[in-house]
Structure formats: structure tokens, C-alpha cells
Image (cartoon, rainbow, N blue to C red):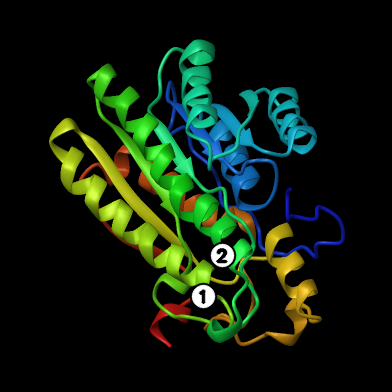
Amino acid sequence: MDDREPQDVPTIDVPIAPVYPVLTDKVAIVTGAAMGMGKATAVIFAEAGASVVLADVNEVLGQKAADEINQRGGKAYFIKTDVSNSESVEKAVAAAVSQFGKLDVAINNAALTPDKTPTAEFDEAYFDRVIAVNLKGPALCMKWEIQQMVKQGHGGSIINIASINAFKPQYNMLAYTAAKHAVVGLTKTAALEYGAEGIRVNTIAPGAVLTEMSAAALKSIGTSHEAFADVSYLKRWAAPHEVAQGSLWLASDAASYVTGITLPVCGGYSTK
């Protein structure tokens, strides 16, 4: 089941920053790429010169996103992927190699919407689903991405997408917050283990980003983003492309001495 809802998502009127060819000849895989931050990242990476594999459980929207990139002159390939399933992730990494010859960059973005019950009442079935996708998913992705990068012998860059919840817990999000805290630990461990191989592993911690997933989460608790204006020092939500720009920098050679860090893209919310 895909918890995201593509319809009725308000847009944020923030100009898209210029994109320069900093990923020319690179091959990237982006999970959760059918919409939201994942799609924005795939689009910007293609504009930056990368060949992009879009991996998502939503076959219709994922293929549509890849087609849009190709129609605009980019290079994109879609593969249906369940990040909680090791075989599925292995096939996605293999698809990057078979389609484009290698793997240089990976954005592990796929996630389920937060849970919405207090700790004493948490839904055990949904807890298991969130942990399977939001925590085991990035771990499985790194497993197969790192194996490929080590085999190639020329390093690479992996960016795990966590959340500001990794620093600032929110009410009624036990599983989601636990998973996002743990993603930071996954990143630090992999960065430590594979730095000598030239593989950089970092985390992006987005704040309030207006996406299909966040819109669905707000709808599930009977509210909307307008009711939460004080989500950043900028007094607004982020657009997905603003988070994608953080991933673009970490993926590029401009961040060649950056590994094991967590970059908040949250409009200052992490310091409040």
C-alpha cells in the first residue's frame, strides 16, 4: 500500500535555484522517486547531468516521473521497488548498472507517513511497517549500493533522508521518530566503515516540507499546513526542490571531504 496522495497538494512559491552540471557522467538512484522530495531530487539530478534510476512502489507515478525527465532531455529509468525487500533493492541497484553502466550516487528517500498515536497506544502493525520501510529500507539500500560501489573501486556518495524528528521528537510519532533517529546511526556507521573506500555517507534532515506524504499526514489528523505557520524561522514550509538542493551538494564533488554528517534543511527549526 502506498500512503501518499498525489492530489490536492498546495505548492510553495519559491524560485528553483539554478542547477549546474555538477553530476555530469554520474549515475544516481533515488528511492521514493515517484513524487515529493524524491521526484524533485530525481529531476534536479537529471538537470545536473546525472543519469537517474527512479525506484518506487508506485509504478504508475514512478514511470510518469521518469518519462517527464526523459521528455525534457534527461536520462531516467524507472524500476518498481519495495525498499523493505532485499531482493527488490538488489534488483534496483542492478538496474542502474545494466541501464547506465555503474552507480555513483544513491539517495535513500523512500518512507511511510508518520504514525499518529501516543506511545501507550501505538499501533503495533503500523509500527512494524514504518520500521520496515523507514529504517530497514535505508539499511538494505546501503547494503546493495555499497557492495556495488566497492566493486567498482572509485567511491561514491550516499545520502539517507531522515527528518528533523531525528533531533526534535514530535507528539504521537513513536515509530517514525525512532526510525529517523536510527537513520542517523546507520549513516555514521557506514561512513566510518567505508570511508577508506572513498564512499561518503551523509544524512539530510528535512523540516516541514510540503509533499504528498506530509499533506496526507496532516489530512489524517484533520488539519492542514496553514495551521502550522511557525514551522521554521522563515515562517513557511519548504518546497521539495529546496531539500533536493541539499542532496545535490552532498552528492557532488564540491562535498568531497564531507562524510558522516547530518545536514538539517529545516529553515532553522532544529535550533529552536
**Residue 14 location (% of width, % of height):** 66, 63
Q: Find numbered disc 2 in the image and state the secondary structure of the residue it sits on.
A: helix
Q: Nearer the viewer, residue 119 or 13?
A: 119
Q: What kind of residue is marked 1?
A: Leu
**Residue 150 location (% of width, % of height):** 25, 24
Q: Read off the residue under disc 1.
A: 174
Residue beneath the point at 43% across and 88% down = 272
Query: Looking at the image, which residue sits at the far left?
Result: 196
Contact (CB < 8 A) between labels 1 and 2? yes
Q: Is residue 205 above or below residue 229?
A: above
Q: Quadrant of residue 22?
A: top left
Residue beneath the point at 80% across and 62% down = 9
Q: Read off the residue under disc 2.
A: 127
Q: Quadrant of residue 77?
A: top right
Residue beneath the point at 70% across and 47% down = 35
Circle 1 residues within 10 Å: few <14, some 14–19, many ≥20: many
**Residue 236 location (% of width, % of height):** 64, 77
Circle 2 residues within 10 Å: few <14, some 14–19, many ≥20: some
Q: Nearer the viewer, residue 267 or 21?
A: 267
In the image, taking residue 271 as reference, residue 16 lies left or right, namely: right
* Residue 20 seen in this snapshot: yes
Q: Find numbered disc 1 in the image and state the secondary structure of the residue it sits on.
A: helix
